[in-house]
Amino acid sequence: MLSELQKQAAQAIVNVFETGHTLGDYGRVTLLTGDPGHLTYGRSQTTLASGNLYLLIKAYCAMPNAACARALKPYLQRLADIDLSLDRDQAFRAALKEAGGDPVMQDAQDGFFDRVYWTPAAKTCATLGFSTALGHAVVYDSLIHGSWGALRDRTVKAHGEPAKAGEKAWISAYVGERRKWLATHPNSLLQRTVYRMDAFNGLIKAGNWSLGIPLSVCGVTVDQAALSCRAPVVVSASDAATRNLHLTKPPMTGNDVRALQEALAKEGYVVNRDGVFDEGLDRVLKSFQQEYGIVADGIAGPATRTMLGV
C-alpha cells in the first residue's frame, strides 16, 4: 500500500502533465482543436465529451456554500447531454474559471479525481499485482489520459501477462508500447503528448520506483515544499467595513470620517473633527493628495489612507 506522500507525488506528476503545476490548476479551461475530449477543465483536466465534466459540476453544485453554484446550475442539463456547443460558450467558461478559485470547488475536484480516477487505478494495480508508486502513477495517468484498456491489452499481447513478466518489466514495456502508440497516432495532438512517457522513462531509468522526492518531471520539481502547499485562494484580507471616503449628498458620516479628519489635522491641516465629510474636508483632502503626489480626486482610498496611516 502506498504512503500518502507517494500518492501525492504520483498525482502531482499527472497534474504537471495536464497543467504544468504540481497542484494542478483548478480553474484552467482548455479547448484545443482536434481534442476528442473537447473542452477540458480543472486540476487534472476532465473532459466535456466523456461526461465527467458533468459529474464534477453536478457534485460541486450540490455542495454547501458553493460560491458559483447559481452560475453553473443552469448548465447541468447541457453538460449531461454533452452539448458540444459549450466549447464556445464564453459565459460558461468564465463561470468555470471563477469557480476554480472557490475552495469548495477545489475540494470537489480533489474528491472527484480520487473517486473517478485514483481509486480505480489503485484497484487495477491491486488486481494486476502492482505495488510500486511508479506503477500506480503510470496506471493513474493512463486512466486520466485515456485508452488504458487498449494499451494494456496490446502490452499483454506483445510481452505477456504482468504476473509472469514482473511488475517493473511489464510497466517498462507498457510505457514503451504507449509511447509508440502516441508517437504514431493519426491525431497530431496526441503525438505531442509523448512527453508523458518520456518522463516515466526517465523515472524508470533512474530506478525511482518508489517516487522518492525530490524528483523532476518536465522541468518541474516535485518536492516536499510543493506537495505541502495548498491551491491559491483569492480572497482579500482587507476589512470589509473599510470604505472609500469622498464627498456625497447627503454627506458621509461616521468614525472613519472622524479618523480621516484627525489624521489630516496631525499633518497640520485645519479641519473640523466632527465626523462629517463636507466640502471643507474635500478641499483639505485634495490639498493633501496634491502635496504628496497622489491623484487629487478627493477620494480617501487605499493609497491615501496608507499615506495618512488610517
Image (spheres, rainbow, N blue to C red):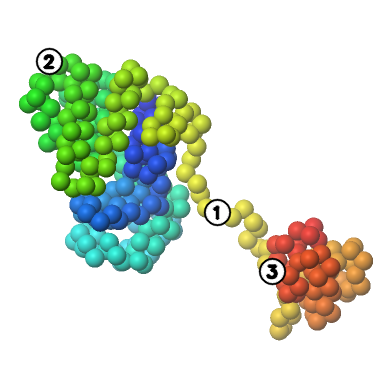
Quadrant of the image occupied by residue 236: bottom right
Q: Nearer the viewer, mark 3 or mark 2?
A: 2
Which label is found at residue 235?
Answer: 1
- Judge left or right: residue 38 versus residue 213: left
**Label 2: element kind:** helix
Identify the image quadrant of the N terminus. top left
Please say if the residues under marks 3 and 2 sit with CB atoms less than 8 Å apart: no
Q: How many marks?
A: 3
Please say if the residues under marks 1 and 3 sit with CB atoms less than 8 Å apart: no
Residue, far bottom: 249
Which label is found at residue 126?
Answer: none
Q: Position of residue 163 (x, y in %)?
A: 14, 17
User: What amino acid does circle 2 point to?
Assistant: Lys
Q: Position of residue 161 (x, y in %)?
A: 11, 21
Task: Write down the residue under mark 2.
Answer: 164
Q: Nearer the viewer, residue 128 or 188?
A: 188
Task: Write down the residue under mark 3.
Answer: 244
User: What amino acid does circle 1 point to?
Assistant: Val
Q: Position of residue 156 (x, y in %)?
A: 10, 25
Residue 296 in view, yes or no: yes
Height in image: 260 above or below 48? below
**Lower position in the chain sequence, tag 3 or tag 2:** 2
**Real-space Cα distance between discs 3 and 2?**
72 Å
